[in-house]
Image: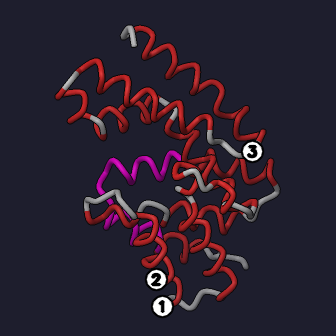
Amino acid sequence: MAITKNQLEKIEFYVCAKLDSLNWQHTQEMRPIAKKLAGLEKADKEIVDVAILFHDLGKHTGESKDHEKRSGEMARKYLEKENFDQRFIEEVVYCVLVHMAGLYNQGHLITTPEAKVLHDADQIQQLSEFGLVKNLINYGADIYGNYQQGLVKTRDIMFKGYNLILTENGRKMAEPGYKLVKEFFKKLDV
């Protein structure tokens, strides 16, 4: 399906209006990563891009738990209202629903190239300067409660994401970020 520039801009506007700036920035930083990885993995770039835009939309409530389900529902509702092709909708919603499966030890549910690209791009983006900032904010209460333990928890979660990357191309793309994060925590003596 060929998505028009106007359709994509409408989705961007819709999602940007609902997400906080931290999650919108994360989404925007994922897009070039996913575009490159989609090319390497021969995934449908349109499905991947639209899935990325919707993947964290369920966090608009301020709650991360089960956000992928809320995100999938919101994606379906929006895309159906805008009369997108049903196969396209199903592919996008599937990608959104399973993008966290690896973190829940259910990586086997991520079967399509597009879903793998979304999952891996999400993990790769976390291994960046911005990913460090986002994770330090997300685990700020843990760090505030016990500085050392909070930093260890943050580091371990970031490293877990790296270890869950599904594609070989994704792992190669994540390597510089992994080294950055490793050095950052090493300098903090964690």
Q: Main secondary structure of the magenta part?
A: helix
User: Which of the two residues, 161 or 82, is positioned nearer the viewer here?
Assistant: 161
- Answer with the quarter of the image where residue 116 lies: bottom right
Q: Does the stretch in magenta take in 106?
A: no
Amino acid type of the residue tagged 2 in the rendering: Tyr
Disc 2 versus disc 1: distance between alpha carbons? 5 Å
Given the current orientation, which residue lies at the most extreme front position? 105
Disc 2 versus disc 3: distance between alpha carbons? 30 Å
Given the current orientation, which residue lies at the most extreme left position? 145
Considering only vertical position in the picture, is 130 above or below 21? above
Q: Are marks 2 and 1 in contact (CB under 8 Å)?
A: yes
Considering only vertical position in the picture, is 87 above or below 58? below
Residue 167, label in figure: 3
Q: Nearer the viewer, mark 2 or mark 3?
A: 3
- Quadrant for the N terminus, please: bottom right
- Quadrant for the C terminus, please: top left
Q: Are marks 3 and 1 in contact (CB under 8 Å)?
A: no
Q: Secondary structure at mark 2?
A: helix
Going from N to C along the chain, the mark reached first, 2 or 3, is 2
Tell me the crowding category of disc 2: few under 14, some 14 to 19, or many 20 or more residues within 10 angstroms, Cα based: some
Q: Position of residue 145 (x, y in %)?
A: 17, 28
Q: Does the stretch in magenta take in 22?
A: yes
Q: Position of residue 139 (x, y in %)?
A: 29, 36
Query: Which residue was labeled with disc 1?
Result: 81
Amino acid type of the residue tagged 1 in the rendering: Lys
Q: Are marks 2 and 3 in contact (CB under 8 Å)?
A: no
- Residue 21 as seen in the image, left or right of residue 127: left
Amino acid type of the residue tagged 3 in the rendering: Thr
User: Which of the two residues, 164 or 21, is positioned nearer the viewer here?
Assistant: 164
- Answer with the quarter of the image where residue 98 lies: bottom right
Query: Which residue was labeled with disc 2?
Result: 78
- The stretch of residues the image draws in magenta is 11-30
